[in-house]
Amino acid sequence: MAEPKTKYDRQLRIWGEQGQAALEKASICLLNCGPTGSETLKNLVLGGVGSITVIDGSKVELGDLGNNFLGIGQSKAKCVCASLQELNDAVKAKFIEEYPETLIETNPSFFSQFTLVIATQLVEDSMIKLDRICREANVMLIFARSYGLTGFVRISLKVCRYRLLEEEFNSPIQPELQKYLTDEDYRYISVAMGFYILLQSVDRFGANYNSFPGQFDGGMDEDISRLKTTAVSLLSDLGCNGSTLTEDLINEMCRFGAAELHAVAAFIGGIAAQEVIKFSVMMA
């Protein structure tokens, strides 16, 4: 095993020994270890984070074989842990074969043992519940999600600059939202805002129809119509009556079919890992 000063030489020059020591003390919990989650942890393991706990109750399927998993039918969490420890055996790693949604519902105190929780690919309802849990336990929380060619990273901390996720979703700053959706001067922001609304809409769609739009072959025209209706209803609930999203955005969201593309997951995971490192080093 290489000496820490040799192994982490380049990053020590950036955040120093104190920052590296803080990173090595960090205890990270990852929820869902698909492409987005595994890419996030890969960056943290290479950086020398102290310990990781991977939570995922699913098994490796044929479609996962292009996403760094090995062995159809095996535990995803187990496979990811084994692969990550090969990258840096100084990092303590363990896995729990459990669906994150189950833990959120039945054992909320579980999350209080960690320095930071990274929740990937959760839908809105689970995100809101986990946000409350981590704020009460004073645990930093990072949400990361990739969806086709779009996605987001969202930080949650128990400080005034970060609103409760439930407030953000249900009570946005309406004049700002309306402006970004309709004002031609903000047309580039409008596209990003459109995807933000659609990422909430697909979760409503999934709750209503037990699948995401475009997820299965056939019925694309029907899914487009349903997603458009869902998005209009969401905008109305947010106080943006009369606002609409472009047909191109809605069609594109359906074309994504809820796919977790590895190139996008690597980008989103890189941003999420960067935020973890920034927080850990700043706390030092």
Image (cartoon, rainbow, N blue to C red):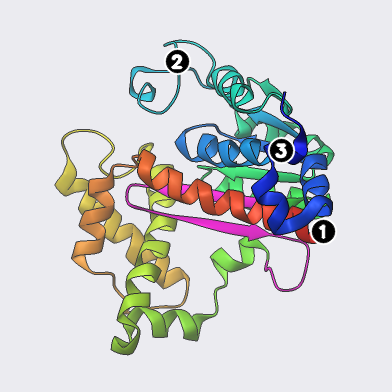
Q: Is residue 46 above or below residue 231?
A: above
> Which kind of residue does numbered mark 3 sit on?
Thr
Per the rendering, the mark at residue 283 is 1
Q: Is residue 107 above or below residue 137?
A: above
Measuring from the top left, give residue 95's x and y in whole percent: 67, 22
Mark 2 residue type: Leu
Label 1 or label 3, whichever lies nearer to me, is 3
Q: Residue furthest front?
A: 6
Q: Which mark is residue 196?
A: none
| Residue drawn at (45%, 15%) of the image | 70
Q: Amino acid at mark 1?
A: Met
Circle 1/circle 3 CB separation < 8 Å = no
Within 10 Å of disc 2 (Cα), the crowding (few <14, some 14-19, many 20+) is some
Give SS at disc 1: helix
Tell which of 47 and 35 is nearer to you: 47
Residue contact at pointers 2 and 1, CB within 8 angstroms = no
Residue stretch in magenta: 142-163
Q: Is residue 148 magenta?
A: yes
Label whose residue precedes the other's in the sequence (2 or 1): 2
Question: For residue 70, which numbered disc appears in the image?
Answer: 2
**Quadrant occupied by the N terminus:** top right
Q: Which quadrant: the C terminus?
A: bottom right
Left or right: where does residue 72 sit relative to residue 100? left
Q: Is residue 28 visible?
A: no
Crowding near the residue tagged with mark 1, few <14, some 14–19, many ≥20 C-alpha atoms within 10 Å: few
> Residue at the location (79% across, 34% down)?
110
Horizontal side of 221 relative to 124 (left or right) equals left
